[in-house]
């Protein structure tokens, strides 16, 4: 839920998966570059990065990215 609330209204996800290491997202956005700082500012995610080049469509950018779960302070 936190993830969907953090994403801008113009983001359309086509894929979302999560495992013990983090999350992977794919979809379309008005500005895909804005997604990295949004995810990085989440208290539960870190090291957000695109996993493939962002491609531009007519009015949206297609993206694929991943982010790791934030480690607790003092965690290993």
Image (cartoon, rainbow, N blue to C red):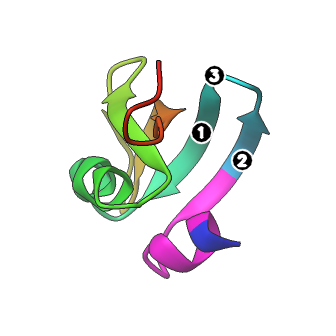
User: Which numbered circle lies on residue 34?
Assistant: none
Front disc: 1 or 3: 3
Viewer-proximal residue among 10 and 75: 75
Q: Quadrant of residue 12?
A: bottom right
Q: Does residue 6 appear to the left or right of 35 in the view shown? A: right
Q: Earlier in the sequence, mark 1 or mark 3?
A: 3
Residue stretch rendered in magenta on the structure: 3-13
Viewer-proximal residue among 61 and 37: 37
Vertical placement of residue 49 versus 72, above or below:
above
How far, Cα to Cα, is label 1 from label 3? Answer: 17 Å
Secondary structure beneath dot 2 equals: strand
Q: Position of residue 18 (x, y in %)?
A: 75, 35
Query: In this figure, which residue is indicated by the disc labeled 2?
Result: 14
Q: Are marks 2 and 1 in contact (CB under 8 Å)?
A: yes
Vertical placement of residue 17 versus 45, above or below:
above
Residue at point 22% right, 49% down?
A: 33
Residue at point 61% right, 31% down?
A: 22
Q: Position of residue 31 (x, y in %)?
A: 27, 59
Q: Does residue 56 appear to the left or right of 68 in the view shown? A: left
Q: Mark 1 packing: few (<14 Cα in 10 Å), some, or many (20+)?
A: many
Q: Does residue 32 appear to the left or right of 7 in the view shown? A: left
Q: Mark 3 packing: few (<14 Cα in 10 Å), some, or many (20+)?
A: few
Query: In this figure, which residue is indicated by the disc labeled 3?
Result: 21
Q: How many marks?
A: 3
How far, Cα to Cα, is label 2 from label 3? Answer: 20 Å
Q: Are marks 1 and 3 in contact (CB under 8 Å)?
A: no
Query: In this figure, which residue is indicated by the disc labeled 1?
Result: 26
How far, Cα to Cα, is label 2 from label 1? Answer: 6 Å
Vertical placement of residue 16 versus 29, above or below:
above
Q: Residue furthest front?
A: 74
Q: Earlier in the sequence, mark 2 or mark 3?
A: 2
């Amino acid at each position: 839920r936190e993830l969907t609330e953090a994403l801008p209204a113009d983001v359309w996800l086509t894929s979302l998966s999560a495992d013990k290491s983090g999350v992977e997202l794919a979809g379309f956005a008005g500005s895909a570059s804005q997604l990295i700082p949004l995810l990085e500012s989440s208290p539960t995610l870190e090291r957000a990065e695109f996993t493939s080049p962002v491609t531009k469509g007519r009015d949206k950018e297609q993206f694929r990215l991943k982010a790791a779960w934030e480690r607790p302070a003092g965690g290993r």
